[in-house]
Amino acid sequence: MSDTSDITSDEEIKIPESRPLSGRLWKKTAVTGRRCKFGLVQEKNKTVEEKVRIRQEENLLRQMTKDNLARIERLREEKKERRRKNIQKQKEAELRSEVVQVIKNPAKLKRLKKKELRKIQKRDTLAKKKKKEAPVPATND
């Protein structure tokens, strides 16, 4: 009895909520303010100013989400473009670093075995030579 007399009517006893059986912690057990004993509770009618303010907030929110989505899409495209450029650079570097052996005697091809013939690839070696032999423009000092 002494325990109950210490609590005043202004104070409320807060019972700690237990873990829901479903395991869905984010779900609230009781929705307050939506229903009453006798049916749905009618919401208070909003003034014109409140409706305009709410509409403006919704438009602002929509615009912000649209901007965020556009920014994310732009970043994604930039990332794809960087990736494409890096792959292209990598392929060019592989071609530059390749060791090429030119077969000058076509009779050699007839003597090669099938496996060796499969490994042979036709390449344009003239373009590579032209790049190496390209004259460097002289600067007049």
Image: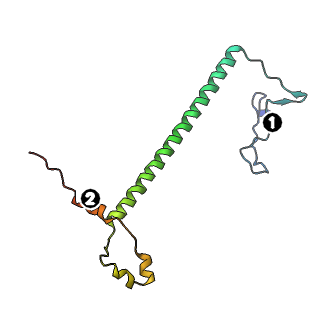
Counting from the top left corner in percent of width and height, residue 53 is at 64, 19
| Image quarter in which the C terminus is found | top left
Amino acid carrying mark 2 in the image = Lys
Is 61 above or below relative to 125?
Answer: above
Counting from the top left corner in percent of width and height, residue 83 is at 45, 52
Counting from the top left corner in percent of width and height, residue 7 is at 77, 33
Is 141 above or below relative to 128?
Answer: above
- Disc 1, SS: helix
Asked whether disc 1 touches disc 2, contact meaning CB atoms under 8 Å apart, the reply is no
Counting from the top left corner in percent of width and height, residue 25 is at 72, 47
Badge 1 local density, few (<14 within 10 Å), some, or many (20+)?
Answer: few
Badge 2 local density, few (<14 within 10 Å), some, or many (20+)?
Answer: few
Residue furthest left as drawn: 141
Residue marked by disc 1: 4
Among numbered discs 1 and 2, the one appearing first in the sequence: 1
Quarter residue 13 falls in: top right
In this picture the colour scheme is: rainbow
Amino acid carrying mark 1 in the image = Thr
Q: Which mark, residue 131?
A: 2
Who is closer to the viewer here, 65 or 78? 78
Residue furthest top as drawn: 48
| Image quarter in which the N terminus is found | top right
Quarter residue 132 falls in: bottom left
